[in-house]
Image (cartoon, grey):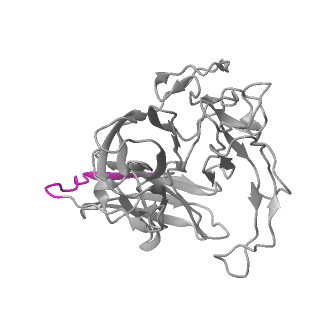
Amino acid sequence: LARYNVSANPNVADSNSGQVIMTIPHPNQGNHNGGWIAFGPDDNLYLAPGDGGGSNDQYCNAQNVTRRLGKLLRIDVIGQVTYTIPASNAFTPTQAPEVWAIGLRNPFRNSFDRLTGDLYVADVGQNAWEEVNYVPAGSGAGINFGWSQYEGTAPFNSGCPSSGILPTPPVVVHAHSVTGDDNCSITGGYVYRGLSQWWLYGAYFYGDWCSGRIWALWQPTPGVFNSIQVTDTTHRIASFGEDVSGEIYVADLAGAVYRLTSTVTGVTPTNLTSVSVTGPASSVTVLPYTFSATANPVSTTLPLTYTWQADDHTVVTHTGGLSDSVTLDWAVSGTKVITVTATNAGGSMVEDTHTIVIAEAQKYYFPLILRN
C-alpha cells in the first residue's frame, strides 16, 4: 500500500512522491492479491488483500485473526505519517490490529453505497460458488465472511482451524456450472444512485469475469435480497465504476469502457402523497437549528429531490431517499418559515412548511448540508 501526492495537475499523481506505508508478505503464490481499496463513510481507509493464493486456503490465513491475508483491513491514514489503528477495530485480543473483518478468499471490487454507507463485498470463489456479502452501515468489527469454512453457503473442508467466530452468510451466491459459459470469478460493482434511470435506483450491479453476465441485486424490504440477471455479454468484466452523478460503467479487460443503460416500458413512478417537515418551534440561544423531512408513501419511486427554502430564499437542493435534513443558523431574530418541496422522478411534487420563532439575534447565517 503506497501513498502519492497530487501533482500540479489535479488529475495526475506525482510519480516521485510515492511512500510505501504497508507491506503484506505474499510469498510463493502469484494469485489472490485482492483488488480493492476505498475510503469509507467514517473516513478510514479499507483494503482487502486475498488469502495468500494457491488453492483451498492452503496457508490457512483467512480464519487466522493474527494474519492480515484473507481479511478486510481498516486503517486511518488522514494526517498520519503512515497510518494509525482505529480503536473500534478491536474484536479479539489476538488479532492483527489492522484487521476489521475476516474470512475472505479473493475480494474483488467492493464498494460503499454512496447514499447509505452500506458495504458490498464481492468474493471470488474456489471451484463451485461466487458470492456477494453485505455489511450494513454502522456495523462493528469482527465480521466473519466464512472462507475457508464455507464457499458461498456450502460447507468447505480446507483442513484449517476455525476462528471460532460465527460466519455471516453471503446475501447472494452464483454457481460455477450453469447453462452456457460458466461463472468463475465475480467482479463487484456499485449501487446505482443516478438520476437518469429512476427504475434502477438503489439496485447493486455486479458481474462475472468469465461468463460476462451482469446481475442486479436489491432489497424489496430491508434485509431481504433479490437478484436477477440483467444481461449476458461477451465482455471480460474487469471492473465497474461510477461517476459523480451516480451513473455506472463497466470496464472490459480488452480496454473498452461501457455505460450501463436501461429502458423501461409500462411502468410509471409511484406518486408522492405528502412530505412533512419537523424542527424546533422556538429558540433563544440554541445553535444550530435542524429540520427534518419525511416523504410518503414508502413505496414512492426514488430518488427524491428535496428543495429547502428559508423565507423564500432557496437554501439547498439535493437528491436523497425517503428522508432528508438541513441545518440552519440565522443572523436576525423573528419568525422564520421553512419550506421543503419533494419531487420524484415522475414529476410528482409535494411540499410542507414549518415555522420557527427566534427570540434572540444570532451572529451569522450559513447553510450546512446533511445527507442521509
Q: Is residue 147 above or below residue 28?
A: above
Q: Residue furthest right?
A: 81
Question: Residue 72 at what x, y percent from top left?
Answer: 65, 40
Residue displayed at 49% across by 38% down: 134
Quadrant the N terminus occupies: bottom right
Question: Residue 175 at what x, y percent from top left?
Answer: 39, 34
Q: Is residue 243 above or below residue 123?
A: below
User: What main secondary structure does the magenta stretch of the protein show?
Assistant: loop
Q: Is residue 136 left or right of residue 17?
A: left
Q: Residue furthest bottom?
A: 8
Q: Is residue 313 above or below residue 237?
A: below
Query: Which of the pair 310/151 is nearer the observer?
Result: 151
Q: Quadrant of residue 181?
A: top left
- Is residue 273 magenta-colored? yes
Residue displayed at 70% across by 29% down: 59
Residues drawn in magenta: 265-278
